[in-house]
Amino acid sequence: MNESDSNPMPSIDDVARVATLSRLALDEDGLEAARRDLSAILGHVAAIQSLDVDEVEPMPRPQDVVNRLAEDEPGPLLDREVLLRMAPRTEGPFIAVPKVLGEGGA
Amino acid sequence: MKHVNNDSNQSTDRDHADDLVARVRSVRDGEATTTDRLERMLSRIDDVNPGLNAFREVLREDARRHADSIDTRLAAGENPGPLAGAIVAVKDNLCTTEGRTTCSSKMLEHYRSPFEATAILRLRKAGATIIGKTNLDEFAMGSSSENCAWGPVRNPHGVDRVPGGSSGGSAAAVAADCADVALGSDTGGSIRQPAAFCGCVGFKPTYGRISRYGLVAFGSSLDQIGPISRSVRDASLLYEVMAGVDPHDATTSEMPVESPLSDGPLHLEGLRVGIPREHVTDENHPGVTDRFNETLDALRNAGVKIVDVDLPLTHHGISTYYVIAPAEASSNLSRYDGIRYGHRAEAIPGEGLEALYARTRSEGFGPEVRRRILLGTYVLSAGYYDAYYTRALKVRRLIKQEFDGVFAQCDVLLGPTTPAPAFRLDADLDPVSMYLNDVYTVNANIAGIPAISIPGGIAEDDGDALPVGLHLQAPAFAEPLLLRTASALETMRSKA
């Protein structure tokens, strides 16, 4: 977990934590394969740690543009039938989801 | 730089007798009909697509209806637009109301979009007929079009070779003459690298030039839609039709769109062409080096001023990209949870919602997409965010500043599009080696500048004759300079 670690090698626990955050179900082999891949990629990416960027402003977009706001006006809505046709499961005019209450706030 | 070659349009016509511009002209002049042209391409697809796997879906009936309406309007003396008669294929990560939009992912196997991408709407309004949706690396993540849920795409120049990626289906479709032109998307080279591997022109405009509305999001600060075509003037025409501000995409620029080739190709004499030393190394394939050196000699003979420039951050581009792109992807792809649309795993009684999300996403996404989601989540997670993500955004600014510096010394940059021609399908590259395919192309996405790959000759590799690409880059919003230079270079090469 050391940010300045120059040789990043995520542990199996790190990968398991990231898989949980990613909402991906990985078995033991999957975790080990992911650890190997992430280590190789992060090993390559580590090169940017050598650059002096202390005085540099981060650049989230390729142009320093200012956001453009749209008028707050109602626009056309998608038809309910169109939206329901996209859903994997429906019940009447609703999208059906698994029961979520009573499982400890998941 | 501002000298115009007055006879250039005539020579361009002669050089590109069979490009999109020539083909739509033949329809407008009554020498061909859209329907006849479409039927020829549909039979071509029937013949070659089983071997190439370039198309995810052929929109046969919709295309027939559209082609018929274009011919009817032409017969009535109407002008359906500059693309009347054009047959266009579009990458299957662009939303169409006809057919499905799968992103070559099991997650979206049955997904039908309720709306159409702005770029495609504009093509249709200009008279284009959409023939089908082309195959790609799943969610546009890849450089070989092998990461496809329903089998890899093959290169028309050698079916045991990859067509490049991620827009491999679009490049293969154009190279195999299954479409006049095709749309791709480019996040780190995904238009230009497959265009180079398949002998086509591939153009990525400045970030913000073409609306991303209806392009399934991968790396939102990097993605741009662009054409894969037979000539630079084809790419320019499609760009002109699609570019411009769109209320549905707040990142589109309000800068007016110029007609890039209205003044014809540039007269090359006096043009300052920068050659990044880092792009012409001994590590390039010998065929790539030979073809590039021949082009340089021809440019010198044409009076171009060759300027050696340094882009020392070139090799940090891949590292920067593989932090920013997966970070944005992990956020963008969090929407696929199996609830409102897309794949949903079979529910197990008593299972919680979190477990259902995780099984849905593990079943729906392929290995490369899962890998990038994990990587993106890692670099955004507590303890690593500043060390990776914030740092990569800072390096992005350094890369942008590096481009600003070299564009003070030269008008455009020229280099090979890729270090080597198309590799074999069974090359079995590890992730990092695969990512290095984009070493010369990613920095244009990181800095948001326009770039184009044009055919740069043929390289011999292991007994195969394979196309290689020439890569031109220009400052942001300098599309006219970029395309006029590319057009002049294309004409020069065709006369060689």
Image (cartoon, rainbow, N blue to C red):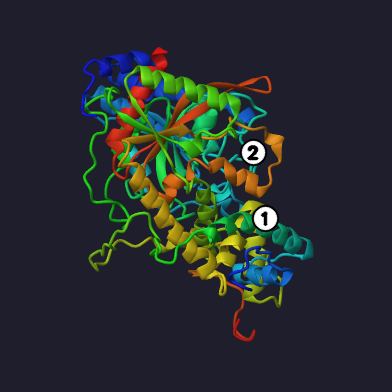
Of circles 1 and 2, the one toward us is: 1
Residue B464 found in image quarter: top right
- Chain letter for mark 2: B
Q: In the figure, is residue A61 to the left or right of B371?
A: left
B248 and A31: which is toward the camera: A31
Q: Distance between the residues labelled 1 and 2?
A: 25 Å
Q: Name the residue under label 2.
A: B152
Question: Do the residues bearing badges 1 and 2 touch, measured as CB atoms within 8 Å?
Answer: no
- Which amino acid, by three-letter code, is at mark 2? Pro
- Which amino acid, by three-letter code, is at mark 1? Ala
Q: In the figure, is residue B126 to the left or right of B145?
A: left
Q: Which residue is drawn at 43% across and 23% down?
A: B296
Residue B450 found in image quarter: top left
A38 and B317: which is toward the camera: B317
Quarter containing the N terminus of chain B: top left
**Circle 1 Cα neighbour tier, 10 Å, few/some/many (<14 / 14–19 / ≥20):** some
Q: Residue at x 24, y 41 (%)?
A: B257
Residue B322 found in image quarter: bottom right
Counting from the top left corner in percent of width and height, residue B28 is at 28, 21
Counting from the top left corner in percent of width and height, residue B474 is at 34, 39
Q: In the figure, is residue B128 to the left or right of A11?
A: left
Residue farthest right in this picture: A29
**Rendered position, B7 above or below B393:** above
Counting from the top left corner in percent of width and height, residue A61 is at 38, 58
- Chain letter for mark 1: A
Q: Which residue is drawn at 66% across and 61% down?
A: B362
Q: In the figure, is residue B447 to the left or right of A27?
A: left
B69 and A32: which is toward the camera: A32
What's the mark number on residue A40?
1
Q: Is mark 1 on a helix, strand or loop?
A: helix
